[in-house]
Image (cartoon, rainbow, N blue to C red):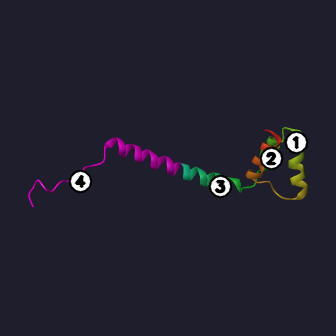
Amino acid sequence: MTPNSIRPKKPLNVQWQGLIGIGVGILVLAIILGLLRWRRDGLPVDPAELQMSATTPCMVQAINAAAVAGRSITYSQLDKLKSKCGQ
């Protein structure tokens, strides 16, 4: 083998390395935020937040119906109620 026949591997362009790093960072951030949102959706809403959300008659009725049923409202249910009632 001659020295000319052995060629070192050409390194990846610095701009591409930066873009790949940014892409991986955004992907990791999206996964973390998605997991936090998933966890939040299953938690029960505290009474103070329910009181702040009860600003329209539709929301008051929905919250009272859930309270009469004896079950606690989770954040995902509250988000659905808000979209249903137009908040």
Q: Which of marks 1 and 4 is in front?
A: 4
For label 2, the residue is 81
Q: Give the range drawn in magenta.
A: 1-29
Give the amino acid type for the residue marked by disc 4 in the picture: Lys
Question: In the current view of this chain or complex, which residue is farthest to the bottom?
Answer: 1
For label 4, the residue is 9
For label 1, the residue is 58
Determine the CA span between mark 3 and mark 2: 18 Å
Determine the CA span between mark 3 and mark 1: 26 Å
Residue 38 image label:
3
SS for tag 2?
helix
Q: Position of residue 31 (x, y in %)?
A: 55, 53
- In the visual, does 76 lie left or right of 27? right
Q: Do the residues labelled 1 and 4 touch (CB within 8 Å)?
A: no
Q: Which of marks 2 and 4 is in front?
A: 4
- Front residue of this view, candidates 50 and 26: 26
Of callouts 2 and 4, which one flags the residue occurring earlier in the amino acid sequence? 4
